[in-house]
Amino acid sequence: MKNLLLVFLTSLTSHVFAQTFGVKGTAKTQQNEAASFATVAMHKALDSTLVKADIADENGGFKFSNLNKGKYFIKISAVGFQNFSSPTFEIIDADIEFNPFTLLAETQQLKEVKVVASKPMIEVKDDRIVFNVESSINSTGTTALELMRKSPGVQVDKDENILIKGKSGVRIYIDGRPSQMSGRDLASTLKSLNSADIEAIEIITNPSAKYDAAGDLGIINIRLKKNRKLGTNGNVNLAGMFGITPKYNTSLSLNHRDKKVNLFGTYSYNQGGWHNRTLDDQILNNVMYNKTWRGLWRDTSNNLKLGADYFINSKNTIGVNFNGRVSDHNGGGESETLIGRRFSTAEPDSAILNSQTSNPEKNKNLNFNLNYRYADTTGHELNIDADYGIFTSRGISYQPNRYTFLRSDRPSFERNYVTKTPTDIIIKSAKIDYEQPFKKGKLSYGVKLSDVTSDNTFDFFTKVQSEEIRDTERSNQFRYTERVYAAYVNYNKSIGKKWNVQAGLRAENTHSLGKLTSFKQNDLDKVDTTYLNLFPSGALSYKASDNHSLNLNYSRRINRPSYQNLNPFEYRIDELVYSKGNPFLRPEYANNFKLTHTYKGKLTTSLGYWRTKYPVVGLRIPYDNSRTYFISENLDYSEGYSLDLSLNTQLTKWWELSVNLNGYHNLWRAKLDNGLIINNRTTAFNANGQSTIKLKNNWTFELSGWYNSPYKRIDNNLAMGMMDMGVQKKFMKDNASLKIVFSDVLNTARGGYYSEYAGVATNLRFKFEGRLLRVTFNYRFGSKEIKEARNRRSSSEDELRRIKG
C-alpha cells in the first residue's frame, strides 16, 4: 500500500513540476460576436495528430495548457460556420496568446438540419455486450426484471434469480453501483424499476482489474438515463399496463446545465399487482404432495434521484448525488395441497392443506455519494468517491394452515404462524482512482475500502387464537460484518496501429465475522474468517483490417456468499418447506477466458471457457418425514464452454435486424458430506432478437422475442420464451411519442423444472402474467443543445452488498 501511494504522489509531483506551456485565444463571427461553445482542437504540425480538444466558453474563449515545445496548428468548427484552420505556429520557451480568430458563415444556410441516429438494440464491444433499451419499442412499459429475460445470454429462473449460461454468480449493478440486495429483495427491486428510467443494460463478463472482483460470472450494469443537454430541459413518461389487473408507472426528469453547474433530478412512481400460478408436485417417503398456488405480488414504490455537479474550472469538478427508494410490497396468495400415499387409492389416507399467506413488507434504500474529479488535457485523471448507504426492511409473514381429513373420525385442525424479519444494513465505502499516460500507454491504479454491517432478525411466533407466542427454538438474530481492503493496477497500451494490450492485477483482503444470537444453544454461533486474494486480468486485441478484429481476454473472479446464506438457523417458508443457512460456505473462484471475432462491426462471434472452484448451488433436502428444507452447498467444481453469435444489420433503409444466439455446455461435479454425488452435464442455448420496420409518417413497427432452451444445473429446467409486438408514433416535432405494445403474443409466459435426488422428487410448473397491453406516452421539453455528461463511477461500485430475502 505504501509503495502504491508513493507511485501515486510521485506521478502527481512530476506532472506538476514538468516544464510546459499554454496557448489561448478567442473565436468570433464576422459580426464580431462570440462563437460560443465552438469546438477547438490542437494538432501537431508534423503528422496532424490530435493533441487536445475542448469546447470554447460562452464568450468564445479557449485555453490549452501543459503543452510541450514543438510546432502545432489549431482547428475550430461550429454549426453554421466553415471549418477554420490556423497557420502553423511553434512553441519555443513562452506561452502564446492569439488575436481573435474569425469564423466565416456557411455560403448556404439551411432552414433546418435534422440529425437522425439510432443505436442498434444489441451492441458488442471489446469487454461487454450492451442491450440498448431505448432502441427497443417492445421494452417500453416493462420492468427491469423483465428486461433481464430479454438481455443476451441472461436467464431468470423459477425463483427469479439472475443466471448467465445457466449459472448464478453474476453481480447486479444499478447505475454504476452494486445492488445491496440478492434473492427475493433484488427481484422486488428490479420489478419496481421501470424501463422508462433505463438507458441500457451492460453485460460485462470479464471486467478489468479496475472493477471489484465480486461476481464470478462478471457484472450486469443497469445504466439509468442521464441528461446530456445544456440549458433547462426535462422528460415526462406516463405508462399503463393492462392484464389481469391494471398497473401504472410515471416519471418526471428535470435537468439544468450551464458551464459552471449541472443540477438534475428524477422522480418515478410505480404501482401494480402481478399474478402467478404454480403447480408443485412432490414425493417424499412415498407420500405425494400436490400443491396448487395462486399468487399475487403487489408493489408500490417511490424513487427519487437528486444530484449536482459544480465545475470549478476546466479541470476540477465536485459533485454530490442522492438516490432513494421507498417501497411497499405485499406478496401472498392461496394454496391447496392434496396429501396422500403414493400407491394408495383409499380416500381415508388423504388430507387437504389449505393456506392463505400474506407477506407485507416495507423497504427503504438510501444512498449518498460525494465525489471529486480532476482531469487535464494530457490524460491525467483523479477520481475520489465516498459513499454511505442505508438499507432497511420490515417484513412480516402470516401463514395460516388448515388441515382437513377425508376420514370422518379425524377432525380438522389449524396451525397458524407469524414470522417477523427486520433487516438493517449500513454500507460505508471510499475509493481513489488515478490514470496517467505511461510509456505511450495509460496506467491506472487505485485503492478502496468498504465496510458493511448487516443485522438480520428472525422472530418466529405460533399464533394461538389471537395471541402470538414466540418460538424460542426458531427465533434468532444474525449480525454479519465485513471489511474489504483493495488495491489495483492496470495498464493499457496500443502497439502500432493493429495491436492493443491490457493487463491488470487486483488484490483484496477480506475480514468477515458472523455472530448468531439465539435462545437455542448452537455450536455455530460465531464464524470468523480472513483471507487475501489476487485477481489478475488481461486482454489482447488485434485489428487485422477494417472488416476483421480479434479480442482475447481473461479475468479471475470471486463470488462471496450472501449474508443470509451464512445464517445457520432455520426459516419457515411455509408449512411444509423450510430454509437453512450454511456458515461454512466458501467463496466461489472462477477463471474466465473469451475469444471474440468481429466482422464489419455487424457480426460478432465469441468462444468462451470458464472453470469455477466451489460453486454454490441450492439443494432441497428432507427435513423430516413430511417436510423439506433448502440449503446452499459448495460443489467441488464446475466448468463450461460457450459459443455466442451476434448480428446487427440494416437489411434495407427501412428494415433493421438484431439477433443474438448463445450456446453453452456446463459440467457440475461434487461428492457431498451427506453422500449425495453430483455429476451433471447440460448443453443448452438461449436467443433473442428484434426486427424493426420504419413506416411512413413517423410510424415504426417492431417484433421481438426471446427463448431459453431446457437446461440442467441440479434441477432439470424447462424451456421458456416470449414474443412481443408493438408500434410507435412520433409527433410534435419528434418531441413526443406514443407506444403501444402487445406482449406475450403466443401466451407462453411459463416455465418449470423437475428433479429427483436425496429422497425427494419434485415436478414444478409455473405461469406468470406476461400477456399485457402496454400503452406509453413520452414527452421531452426544453433545451436541445447537446453536451456530453460527466462520466463518473462512485466508490460504492466496488462494495460487496449481498442481502438475500
Image (spheres, rainbow, N blue to C red):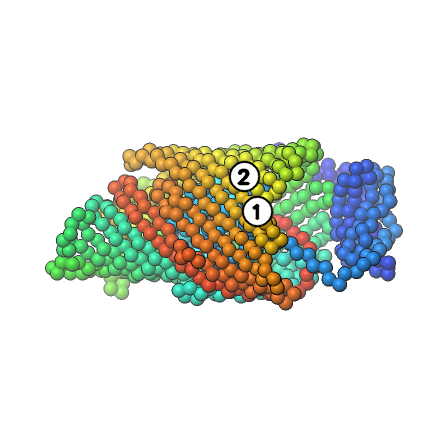
- Using the image as rendered, state which of residue 721 and residue 758 is in the foreground: 721
Q: Is residue 433 above or below residue 103?
A: above
In this picture, residue 651 sits left or right of residue 231: left
Q: CA distance from mark 2 to mark 1?
A: 12 Å
Who's the residue at 82% across and 39% down the image?
A: 45
Q: Amino acid at mark 2?
A: Thr
Category of crowding for the residue at label 2, using alpha-carbon neighbours closer than 10 angstroms: few (below 14), some (14–19), many (at least 20): some
Q: In the picture, residue 667 is in which quadrant?
A: top left
Label 2 SS: strand
Would you name the residue on which mark 1 appears?
Answer: 648
| Quarter that holds the N terminus | top right
Q: Earlier in the sequence, mark 2 or mark 1?
A: 2
- Using the image as rendered, state which of residue 591 and residue 340 is in the foreground: 340
Who's the residue at 33% across and 35% down the image?
A: 678
Residue 142 image label:
none
- Using the image as rendered, state which of residue 291 and residue 70 is in the foreground: 291
Q: Is residue 639 above or below residue 419?
A: above
Would you name the residue on which mark 2 appears?
Answer: 605
Q: In the picture, residue 8 is in which quadrant?
A: top right
Q: Position of residue 280 (x, y in %)?
A: 30, 52
Label 1 SS: strand
Query: Residue 705: in sight, yes or no?
Result: yes
Q: Amino acid at mark 1?
A: Asn
